[in-house]
């Protein structure tokens, strides 16, 4: 990827484990903690897409809270746990390899950034709580354009910021629809297939698929 001038990461599910909030409460939630976490995440994403289509934007933190309300009702989880789960969502755990990979990439002459549905405040707290402050040049939030991924306005932000072409951006996401969104915009998208999933049929197939971010170091 000699043409790459920037490496841009999705945050949720790519750098940070979205299930880690529920996992930290698994003794209170019980054996259904993982189905609950997956349902919360799926509902959260559905709300972002539906609100984009309806043109009724709420920020990602509001959507995270509202999708949690539904998920707690579905799984019959005590309402008193809501604040605990939300506070843990603000400080999600990174995947084990993340910090080391970012440090190694930082030594290359490339821009490093996050491009996320998260609010600026959420992204800053995620990065700072995991001691990743000095590793990113930018934290791009959809709040700049008030619409969620995979709208092209989101993927356009780094292109404008850095004055480069879409194909000069290497973009990594664990979400197949996000990989396709970036790829159809013109990014060189890489799928971080952490869960050995199947790729969606959305008019784009990434040239590279990796199981974790450590494998990125063999590509760039």
Image (cartoon, grey):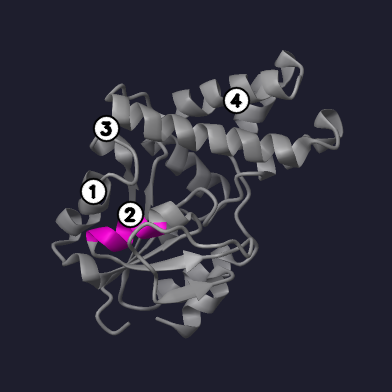
Work out whether mark 4 precedes mark 3 in sequence or the reverse, and give the earlier one: 4
Residue identifier under label 3: 146
Gap between marks 2 and 1 measured at Cα: 7 Å
Q: Quadrant of the N terminus?
A: bottom left
Residue 171, percent across and down? 36, 64
**Spatial separation of the CA atoms under disc 3 and disc 2:** 17 Å
Relative to 145, is 105 above or below? below
Looking at the rendering, the stretch of residues picked out in magenta corresponds to 179-185
Looking at the rendering, which quadrant does residue 60 occupy?
A: top left
Q: Nearer the viewer, mark 4 or mark 2?
A: 2
Give the alpha-carbon distance from disc 4 to disc 3, as whole Å: 21 Å
Q: Which residue is identified by label 4?
A: 68
Residue 24, image x and y in percent?
75, 39
Q: Residue at x 76, y 19 (%)?
A: 76
- Pointers 4 and 2 in contact (CB under 8 A)? no
- Comparing labels 3 and 2, the label whose residue is closer to the camera: 2
At mark 1, the secondary structure is helix
- Sooner in the amino-acid sequence: mark 1 or mark 4: 4
Give the percent coordinates (x, y) of residue 67: 55, 25
Residue at 27% of width from left, 46% of height from top?
Answer: 154
């Amino acid at each position: 990827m000699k043409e790459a001038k920037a490496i841009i990461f999705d945050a949720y599910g790519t750098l940070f484990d979205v299930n880690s909030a529920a996992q930290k409460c698994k003794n209170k939630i019980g054996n259904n903690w993982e189905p609950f976490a997956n349902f919360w995440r799926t509902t959260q994403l559905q709300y972002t897409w539906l609100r984009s289509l309806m043109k009724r934007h709420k920020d990602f933190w509001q959507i995270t809270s509202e999708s949690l309300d539904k998920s707690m009702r579905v799984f019959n989880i005590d309402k008193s746990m809501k604040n605990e789960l939300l506070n843990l969502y603000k400080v999600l755990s990174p995947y084990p390899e993340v910090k080391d990979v970012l440090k190694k990439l930082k030594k290359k002459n490339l821009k490093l950034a996050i491009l996320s549905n998260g609010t600026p405040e959420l992204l800053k707290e995620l990065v700072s709580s995991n001691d990743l402050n000095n590793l990113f040049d930018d934290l791009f939030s959809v709040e700049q354009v008030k619409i969620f991924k995979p709208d092209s306005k989101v993927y356009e932000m780094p292109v404008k910021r850095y004055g480069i072409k879409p194909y000069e951006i290497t973009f990594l996401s664990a979400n197949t629809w996000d990989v396709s969104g970036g790829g159809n915009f013109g990014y060189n998208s890489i799928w971080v297939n952490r869960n050995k999933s199947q790729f969606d049929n959305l008019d784009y197939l990434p040239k590279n698929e990796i199981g974790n971010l450590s494998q990125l170091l063999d590509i760039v």
